[in-house]
Amino acid sequence: MDSILMQRRLFLYNFRNLRKAKGRRETYLCYVVKRRDSATSCSLDFGYLRNQMGCHVEVLFLRYIAAWDLDPGRCYRITWFTSWSPCYDCAQHIASFLRSYPNLSLRIFMARLYFCEERKAEPEGLRRLHKAGAQIAIMTFKDYFYCWNTFVENREQAFKGWEGLHENSVHLARKLRRILLPLYEVDDLRDAFKILGL
């Protein structure tokens, strides 16, 4: 039986937040699924997935969770830590999924931003995903530390960040903020109109 924990080298290679990550063609997704009952939450599952046979990992996870037959009367919170941000098509699938399950919230922490060379649609996909209610952010040291202690077969070795981890996280977070900025500006404008009674 395979371990539910990721090997250290696999995690460090695939989740390293390099500015140019050539050769890293697979996306890995670490997940935690919780059910929220009033003030408390109960962990239902955790683990990791990767792309398989031409199917993107985000779609694999959506199929997996849809098979659970979630109780519409309960609230669920899913947290993803991904090695790449979703492509445009996956962002569309995720947004549609979130609209179908209003009792489910999704947080996505990404190691790197994915931009396909052929299309420039990925920023729009991220905006639509955010608009659908997903909380999206770039992974920071704290997120890597959590992943290391939750999803990685670390043999009780402490997580040590690599050179450039913080700087690259800040750089990518600024880039993500610029992508989402048009959404923030529209929301701020709507709020201003409401305050002014317009």
Image (spheres, rainbow, N blue to C red):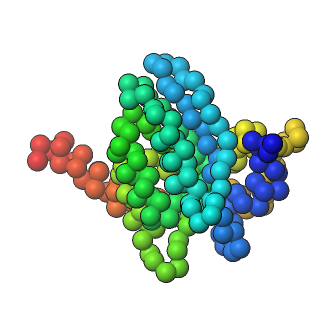
Measured along the vertical axis of the image, is residue 110 above or below residue 120?
above
Q: Position of residue 5 (x, y in %)?
A: 77, 43
Q: Nearer the viewer, residue 172 or 52?
A: 52
Outermost residue to the bottom: 118
| Total count of labels | 0
Q: Position of residue 44 (x, y in %)?
A: 59, 29
Q: Residue at x 45, y 38 (%)?
A: 105
Q: Residue at x 42, y 71 (%)?
A: 121
Q: Is residue 46 visible?
A: yes
Q: Position of residue 22 (x, y in %)?
A: 69, 74
Residue 63 horizontal side relative to residue 4, left or right = left
Q: Which quadrant of the view contains residue 75?
A: top left
Q: Nearer the viewer, residue 174 or 135?
A: 135
Residue 25 horizontal side relative to residue 130, left or right = right
Q: Nearer the viewer, residue 20 or 36?
A: 36
Q: Residue at x 38, y 29 (%)?
A: 72
Residue 91 horizontal side relative to residue 147, left or right = left
Q: Which quadrant of the view contains residue 58?
A: bottom right
Q: Is residue 139 visible?
A: no
Residue 191 horizontal side relative to residue 93, left or right = left
Q: Position of residue 88 (x, y in %)?
A: 45, 65
Quadrant (top left, top right, bottom left, bottom right) of the N terminus: top right
Q: Residue at x 22, y 50 (%)?
A: 190
